[in-house]
Image: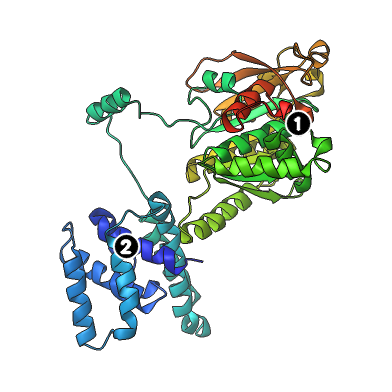
Amino acid sequence: MFPTAFQRSLIALMFQDTSFRDMASAIIAPPLFDGKVEAKIAGILINFSKTYPGIVITQAVVVNEVKKLAAKKEMDKADLPGVLDIIKLFGVPIASEPYIRKEFQAFATHKILETEIINSVDLLKKGQYDEIVRRINSAQAKTSACAVHEEFYLIAGIEDRIAEYEAGTAFAEGVSTSVRELDNMLFSRGVAPKEMIVFCGAAGRGKSILLGNIGLRATHAGEVVLYYTLEVDRKIVMARSDACVTGIAFDNLAMDFMKAKAQWDIYRRVPPVGELILLDKLPMTLKPSHIRADLHRINETRVKMGLKPVSVVIIDYADIQASDRKNDDKRLDTGDIYVDDRSIAKEFEVSVFTASQANRANLWKKNVDLDALSEDFSKAFTADYVVGMSQTKEELAMRDSTGRGTGVQRLYVGKNRNGPKAGCATLMTDLARSRYSMGDWDEWDKGVYGCLTCHL
């Protein structure tokens, strides 16, 4: 569950951060590490912390302690490569350091409980169940202390905040919605880490296409996207991605496959390019707890490979997820889902995008607002942004001056946490090429391909 690469990064963090080392040393012990070398180096750091709390440790100290262990025959030449590999990590920045810090509690909890369970075998044979329960509870209480708790001081932090305002670094830049006009209306100029947006539209408004567009634009910007499709088959999602990126009409992909390959080759040569990880799930089966498990699993693998963890989660769409809690009222299930999805955004520091089905009465409504959210209004107060997707019958028939497009739509900002609401972005769609905002993708074409793909 916790590979060698993770455990070595944890040891390197203990070396580099004295306060983290002191905190960890009060909770974990060397035997919790799987490898002999990892356990010995961790033991050196833990013993140093207990003897010299708050004091910076140097590589020279570690090397000297390793020599002592070798003299006592507790380490030998076969251990030397592993020792050198760990010491090399001491002097370089740790990849995905926030992830290592966050996963430390899971590591400590898993390892300590594992040890206590093994040690309880004899107690189980003797029927000493109360002692087993006491040990397990004690272990859980111990590991709860390693949760990262940060106090922030309003008055003492004034100067730091003013400096961030001046430098323009006070707030994170958001992940684009793929519609520039909409981005400019949102407080984070997109959806920032720890935030969630809900798009609300009637059937046929292109919710899935918009979510797919967001994933592609985020990937091209270097983000790592975890994309759940619960209704649309994965092959359709991939084909829509091909149509969108290449500018080839969805119906013509099989005929123009050579052009599609050429366009993708250009796309991949324009850095930075991240990754989109697609998971195809059945409706009403995906629970928020499953998303958490997937994030842990995928991030663990990516960190082990030295890759960036997931930064964007897209759920198509939350209305057909399953709740981790069973309520008699389905609306309560739906509310729980949205609350949990929003918690995932904050817990994993990711931007979450999803959609909701609007009520039938909103099919041709001029502006789809918060009242259109089906089943449960808690979707609105949970999300940071709620955007309605609107279109009248007349707008459906509209085309641009050259005859291009598949109808005009409007994105109405019904909720904008920390920013003004009631803004409206008007755009021409190009759903035949799986492009939600034709104008934005035309601009993207010019930047990536040097011309409009419709002219290729």
Tell me if label 2 and label 1 are in contact, CB under 8 Å. no
Left or right: residue 175 versus residue 247 is left
- N-terminal of the pair, mark 2 or mark 1, is 2
* Residue at screen point 42% across, 74% down: 34
Q: Amino acid at mark 2?
A: Leu
Front residue of this view, candidates 447 and 368:
447
Q: Amino acid at mark 1?
A: Arg
Residue 31 in percent (x, y) is at 36, 75
Left or right: residue 436 versus residue 10 is right
Residue 143 in percent (x, y) is at 39, 60
Task: Give the residue number, with chain letter if any, for mark 1.
Answer: 433
Front residue of this view, candidates 355 and 437:
437
Q: Which mark is residue 89?
A: 2
Q: Determine whether the residue tagged by mark 2 lies in a helix, strand or loop.
A: helix
Picture quadrant where residue 409 is located: top right
Q: Which mark is residue 274?
A: none
Residue 429 in percent (x, y) is at 73, 22
Q: Label 2, label 1: how many angstroms apart (C-alpha)?
A: 47 Å
